[in-house]
Amino acid sequence: MSEFLSANIPKFISVLSAIAVFFIVLGVIFAIAGRANGKKARPIALTIFLGPALVLLLAGVVIPGVRTILFSFMNPDSNKFIGLGNYQWMLEDPNVKVIMINTILWIMVVPLFTAALALLLAIMLDRIKHESIPKSLLFMPMAISFVGASIIFKFVYEYNEPDQVQIGLLSAIVNFLGFVPSDWMLSKPLNTFLLMIIYVWTQMGFGMVILSAAIKGVPSDIVEASSLDGAHGWRLFRNITFPMVKGTFIVVLATGVVGALKVFDIIRTMTGGNFGTNVLANEMYSQTFVQFDQGKGSALAVILFLLVTPILIYNIRSLRKERAHN
Amino acid sequence: MSKKIAEHTPGRKIFSSKIATTIVWIVTIIWTVPTLGLLVTSFKTNENILGEAWWNSLLNPDFTFENYKGVFLGDGSASLSTGVLPYFINSIVITLPATIFPIVIATMAAYALAWIRFRGSDFLFFSIFALQVVPLQMALVPLLLLFTGGAHIGSVQIFPALGIAGDFAGIWLPHTMFALPLAIYLLHNFISGLPRDLMEAAYVDGASHFTIFRRIILPLSIPGIASIAIFQFLWVWNDLLVALTFASGTEEVAPLNSKLASLVGQYGSGYTQLSAGAFITIAIPLIVFFSLQRYFVRGLLAGSVK
């Protein structure tokens, strides 16, 4: 026990002192800079308020990003330029081809399925009593880490030989329906879709909650007027509800695409990228930190970045529009 | 919301109440059962986990706390000799500063972008907004190199090695950096919506930006800050990529989530360790989620609905 304490008490001391130092430094700077007045007051205030964030963003995101682009044209140790070699490897390597196909599958299937299910549930939630209970439970997986979610589903997807008890829910259900279960994580291409389910399970609640808020925001007189005109069911949805929440639906889709592109924890925990389930973000990690090839790893990161740029451009455009509007 | 308004929302006219209620509850059950399965499994003995499906165990319960005891304090096995308690502490030690630092820095930046006029402020805001979607992967390797070897131009060292790789500071810093774009954007939405008159009145009275920030902005932004803090807390607690990259896997610094991930890969780590370990890992986020759900939802909505 005393060994345990001597190993862990310093951790608490370091965290408390780090936080204390942070606030003391901030307080001192505020006290000193607050005295400045006249012409210098504004530039000083700007520097202090904005400076730390800008320095951290430059040093932590912008400059490393540029260096990663440079590394992608270099050898594994990043000390010699090799031109387009790493990109050529991507085009030629059959494993990378599988990775690209899987990644594209992920960004096409997952966001659409997540957003569609979220919209359906949001509409139906609007219709039921005590909506907060199912809403909470459907939303809950969002608080669970991808690693935790993967372990939860490891038990769901557990498979035993046919003569043994099936302790995995999926195998048991398949058994119950009269089919023979298989070792799910080894069955291509089904395994990729089973991994996608884990992602959808964790992220669907996000879409549902914001779509639900958007639906509540649809003015009731519009709904009332159109239903007096005889619009019900599908027609009401297509002509009124969907157009009104389209913006939010696109936000959910875009968030889904960015998230699905970066999926790493699930793949790593469930299959380690084996059995034909590998994706870009996982291969980026493996190339960099397992194969120690910073060149290939960086090139994969650059591809990841290129794939999000359409969304980046779309986001900037809509923010512009929104600001012009106000 | 009054009953009358609820009657006129679109859902009312698209599905009948019975169908909607049935489907929602079926999906809710499907959504909840996997977690329930893990919870039940984590209280079973190893032979019991293998020999009997967890839903059958509910009928003839034979549960034990041994798994939790073993996982927390160590069960003598190769994969868990000392238990996860040190990792649990690491997670707390990592998460607190990695939540507080970026949010304080982002609140300051958001105030400057919203209420101090200067040339290029719009450009800066858009640039920070754009950084939100840049994948972490773009920054990992160079940042790690900066921590271990400093920065060079050619062979000239322009920045010394920070020497914080594998240290707690080496995890707080990347988390702080990566959190800023989203936090600044969300807090800017919040802070720029505060009433202009308040700020102008204080300024006319001779208050400095620092006084305005402390006396007006901070108190009024507490709800916004709280919701973003919950987000950041969950994000850091649940993170794997930053932890794997910047914390070595040892019990000195590695967080719970990365320990859990390593248990999965380790041969011989049993179902009891996995299930109890997973539940210990997700317990804190679930408590945070259920007790602060209202703030959490507000944070989500601030970021995405317009």
Image (tube, coloured by chain):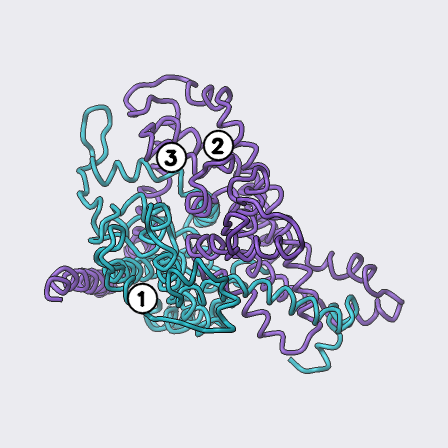
Dot 1: chain letter:
B
Dot 2: chain letter:
A
- Residue type, label 3: Ser
Closer to the eye: label 3 or 2: 3
Note whether A55 is above or below B280 in the view shown.
above
Q: CA distance from mark 2 to mark 1?
A: 46 Å
**Chain the render paints purple:** A
Secondary structure category for the residue under label 3? helix
User: Which sits in the foreground, A268 or B63?
Assistant: B63
Secondary structure category for the residue under label 2? helix
- Is B246 left or right of A3, judged from the image as shown? right
Where does residue B237 sit, x and y in percent of width and height? Answer: 36, 58
Q: Are marks 1 and 3 on the same chain?
A: no
**Chain the render paints cyan:** B
Report which residue position mark 3 lands on.
A286
Occupied quadrant, residue A41? bottom left
Report which residue position mark 2 lands on.
A303
- Residue type, label 1: Ser
Report which residue position mark 1 lands on.
B208
- Residue type, label 2: Ile
CB contact under 8 Å: marks 1 and 3: no
Q: Residues within 10 Å of mark 3 (few under 14, many from 20)?
A: some
